[in-house]
Image (spheres, rainbow, N blue to C red):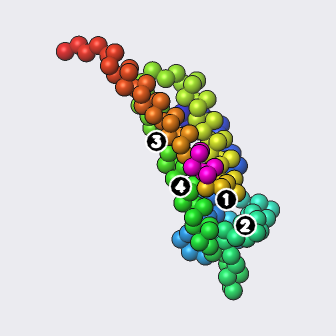
């Protein structure tokens, strides 16, 4: 697990910055500089987003009406932004449940686990950057797909438990 995290965790996944900003603005309005400072402090200096990343991203979030600018130059989240962040949270919960199930399966090889984690990370990043543009139907279809995949994994666990030989 640590090898995967060092490889994938060392670079911020695409879409993470958008999600980070929305989550931060759910707490209270922030200026661009405050967002950069908070990211640096929270990551203990590992991630220091540049103004060249944050300000164009804030512009896109404004264009998408996920955030709005206050009179004092700070940014605050809109209702649409809160709804988008909530949708991403729901999908993240489903993915986390799948990962929990995956790690409970004792005989999944490390290579397979690493491969699945990388795919989930990529999928989650793509989703978080596109969820604002997805229709309700697309979101539901994606959610159903994840839930059906989770059921398949859980079914495999049940089958394996039935084959276990218990020695007292």
Mark found first going from the N terminus, 1 or 2: 2
Q: Main secondary structure of the magenta part?
A: helix
Residue at x 25%, y 15% (from the top left corner): 166
Mark found first going from the N terminus, 4 or 3: 4
Query: Magenta stretch: residue 84 in it?
Result: no
Tags 3 and 2 in contact by the CB under 8 Å rule?
no
> Dot 1: few (<14), some (14–19), or many (≥20) neighbours within 10 Å?
many
150 left or right, relative to 127: left
Q: How many marks?
A: 4
Tags 1 and 2 in contact by the CB under 8 Å rule?
yes
User: Start and end of the magenta stretch?
Assistant: 137-142
Decide if residue 117 is in sight here. yes
Measured from the top left, where is residue 161 in percent x and y?
34, 22
Mark found first going from the N terminus, 2 or 4: 2
> Dot 4: few (<14), some (14–19), or many (≥20) neighbours within 10 Å?
some
Q: Assign a secondary structure to mark 1.
A: helix
Q: Which residue is mark 4?
A: 89
The answer for how far apart the CA atoms under marks 1 and 2 are is 8 Å
Q: Which residue is mark 1?
A: 132
Tags 1 and 4 in contact by the CB under 8 Å rule?
no
Using the image, tell me which numbered label, if any, was put on residue 64. 2
């Amino acid at each position: 697990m640590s090898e995967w995290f060092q490889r994938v965790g060392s670079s911020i996944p695409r879409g993470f910055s958008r999600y980070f900003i929305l989550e931060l603005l759910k707490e209270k309005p922030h200026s661009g500089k405050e967002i950069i400072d908070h990211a640096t402090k929270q990551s203990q200096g590992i991630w220091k987003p540049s103004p060249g990343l944050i300000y164009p991203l804030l512009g896109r979030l404004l264009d998408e009406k996920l955030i709005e600018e206050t009179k004092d130059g700070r940014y605050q989240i809109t209702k649409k932004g809160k709804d988008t962040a909530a949708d991403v949270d729901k999908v993240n919960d489903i993915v986390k449940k799948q990962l929990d199930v995956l790690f409970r399966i004792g005989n999944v090889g490390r290579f397979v686990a690493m491969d699945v984690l990388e795919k989930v990370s990529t999928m989650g990043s793509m989703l978080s950057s596109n969820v604002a543009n997805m229709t309700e139907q697309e979101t539901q279809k994606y959610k159903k797909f994840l839930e059906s995949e989770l059921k398949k994994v859980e079914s495999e666990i049940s089958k394996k438990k039935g084959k276990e030989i218990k020695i007292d």
